[in-house]
Image (cartoon, coloured by chain):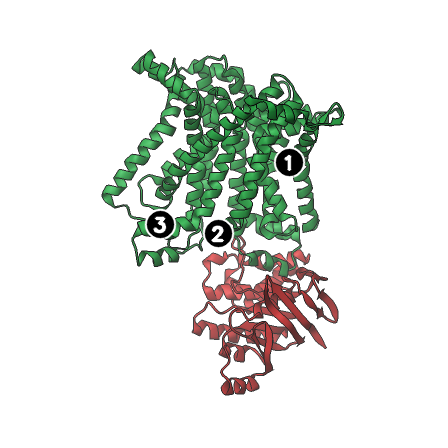
Chain colours: A red, B green
Amino acid sequence: MNIIEVQSVSKVYGDRAAVSGFSLNVAQGERIALLGPSGCGKTTVLRLLAGLAVPDSGRILIDGAAVATEGRNLREPEERNLGMVFQDLALWPHLTVRGNLEFGLKARRVPAGERRHKVRKMLERVRMAPYLNAKPATLSGGQQQRVALARALVLEPRVLLMDEPLSSLDIELNVRLRREILKLQGALGFALLYVTHDREEAFDMGVRVIVMSGGRMAWAGSVEDARDYFATTSPTP
Amino acid sequence: MGRRIVLWIVVAVLAAVGLAPILIMLAKSVIVDGWLSLEFYSRLASSPRQWTLLGNSLILAALTTLLTAVVGLPLGVLLGKTDLPFRRGFATLFSIPLVLPAYVTAVSWFDLLGRDGLLARIAGAAAARETSNWLFGLPGCVLVLFSTFLPIVMLLTMVYLTTVSPRLEEAARLVGGWPRTLRGVTIPLILPGVLLAVLLVFLLTLGEFGVPSFLRYDVFPVESFIQFSAFYNFGAATAAAIPLALITLGVLVVERIFLREKTYQLRPAPQGVGRPSIELGPAGRWGFFAAVAVLCLVIVVAPLLVLVIQSTSPSVYLDALARAGDSLLRSVAFAALGATLLTVLGVLTGYLIHTRALSCWRVVDSLTIFLFALPSTVIGIGLVSLWNRPATNFIYATPLIIVLGYVAQYTGLTSRIMVSTLGQIPPSMEEAAQMAGGRWFRRFSLIIAPLAGRGVAAAWLVAYIFCLRDVGITMMVYPPGMETFPVRIFTLMANGRPSLIAAMCVILVAATVIPLTLLRFVFRPARPV
């Protein structure tokens, strides 16, 4: 059963089509990498799924129910139970690590005791438990990435959307964090939709790779097929 | 409550408090004895005096605007872009006249150059007669309003300079020096913002009535005020107010067409990027320092100093507090209440404009700016038109009417401050909260408002200062026995002792400068978000 179904979705900004006739199914526990150059529409796809942008045409379904259709959201982002890690991480600087993680739990009225337990457990998973009361500005780049990941995962989403979250890190840290994300994905079983412009990163994070170009799906297949595809063509990414 | 509902309530409040009075006033000006008539307008148009007044208003506004632009732009560049010594101090000093009622500056110049002023004691009666003749009239009005509105161009130039990407300037400096970079890159990039400031000065001068009234230079807003307060000819007062409203509207339409989108694009360059500063060199630094210091001394320090000298006796201050202590307390209370309401409305209006959450965001933006630029006498007459009826006496006969006037005129200020503040918060901050399941009120109160904390504090202080200095609206609408401190000074100016007036002005300066000092603390460099 698919968790997410995207049916021929389009989105236009001004006179520029960011996404055109894009379709996609995401199944439980699946790992998909969206690969493409800047401006190809991959971030817009994530924003449409999250509900942060509204499709101009097409439909988006979650668990079989339409959440967005032409020109309107039927379910707001806070009602979709999707996790998202933003490119700039968007950690709230005035809140501590604990505050960042508790925000969503409080919004869902999780009792205080259970909240504390969930936060501690998640921070232990990402090896950030000692930084419970630290403010984001005092953390290193890698630590901030872990907190952003923990913030998204503490709500136990069935799908995690990641928008080039590691692009600002050096290659060594980038690779190490990829391993950690994959380990978490294996343990928690959420579906992962990972946006990147880096081919190797896409091959590493996805089981399925979707290549985007000019707002359209240019190619889709397994990582193995993708390697062959790129070996025989000279696409943009 | 959902975001759209809250924002629609804000729009409704703005329409009721700001737009409705103007529309009612407009309607009343075309109704005579229950019939539709343009009688007031035809009387207005056929009176040569009215055309003279309009001409006087336009000449005063044009000269003041020209002078503030010619001095304000280079001054803003010097204070915002160079290593000039004491530049933050200068910026604060030059800002003081803006936060005082303009007539206080007029009083201080009168105390310096008037027939019985300080100059008369130093240089003799003949010289003082000459300067007094010069002060009372167009040159005096231009001088006072120039020093009052100079900070608008200066401060906005300084703010807009921070929006220029240092990389663009560095690229220009590789092929030319700073003068060429300023002429060819920096100033053209900030020009839309500077022109906006210049237009604002034009409109504020056009609507000013305190200074021309004190310095006896006949202008249109004074006529409107006289028709209302002296003759209680409401129709004539309203008809006299309409041309000013139309000119304001016309100027803002021009601004909307040619400048607005360009000024929206002026956003602060990313923090952490080093902003290049122009090194003036030893000779340049001290040369410019001397020039700026002389200007500051002449147009800011000297007039204020004269006020202090005129009121050196402690008994004068005691007398001032005995006569007007109650109105001072009232002023502070009304200003605090007004500032709080203005901040709430400004935050929500700013959020509406910034996020474009409702399709009417442009209309709301234009309305608040229009109301801010509208002469206070026009807003005052509008408020009287709307609220002076038995059913609404619980507002009209109480200080609430003054606070409503503040809200009508100054929401544009607080909303603009908030638009600028919210523009510096990455949209992903609210989006992340939304993804975490936070409803709008939760996101707004726990994420957006705390992140915009400095801007909210600044909006409150700026609103407080503008409410405290207000004369125009308060003068038109204050209920009996509820006059504020600036109104008390204004009414005493005609026949009060000069030393008493000077002491009251000094008290008002102190009540205004204290929050201004707080404002400096608020705007101290903070950690980047």
Q: Residues within 10 Å of mark 1 (few under 14, many from 20)?
A: many
The answer to whether residue A210 is above or below residue A122 is below
Q: Position of residue B69 (x, y in %)?
A: 41, 38
Q: In the rendered view, does B160 fall on the left or right side of B446?
A: left
Q: Amino acid at mark 2?
A: Arg
User: Between marks 3 and 1, how big is the CA–CA gap?
Assistant: 40 Å
Question: What residue is at 70 percent from the left and 61 percent from the top?
Answer: A72
In what element is the residue under mark 3? helix
User: Between marks 1 and 2, how big is the CA–CA gap?
Assistant: 28 Å
Question: What residue is at 26 percent from the left and 38 percent from the top?
Answer: B287
Instruction: Provide the residue designation for mark 3.
Output: B182
Q: Chain of mark 2?
A: B
Asked whether disc 3 touches disc 2, contact meaning CB atoms under 8 Å apart, the reply is no
Q: Position of residue B49 (x, y in %)?
A: 55, 21
Q: Nearer the viewer, mark 3 or mark 2?
A: 3
Instruction: Provide the residue designation for mark 1.
Output: B18
Q: Amino acid at mark 3?
A: Leu
User: Between marks 3 and 2, how big is the CA–CA gap?
Assistant: 19 Å
Instruction: Provide the residue designation for mark 2.
Output: B267
Q: Amino acid at mark 1?
A: Gly
If you read the primary sequence from the N terminus, does the residue marked by circle 3 or circle 1 appear first?
1
Front residue (pair A138, B484): B484
Marks 1 & 2 on one chain: yes
Q: Position of residue B95 (x, y in %)?
A: 43, 34
Front residue (pair A35, A168): A35
Q: Residues within 10 Å of mark 3 (few under 14, many from 20)?
A: some
Residue B477 in view here: no
Marks 3 & 2 on one chain: yes
Front residue (pair A176, A192): A192
Q: Which mark is residue B279?
A: none
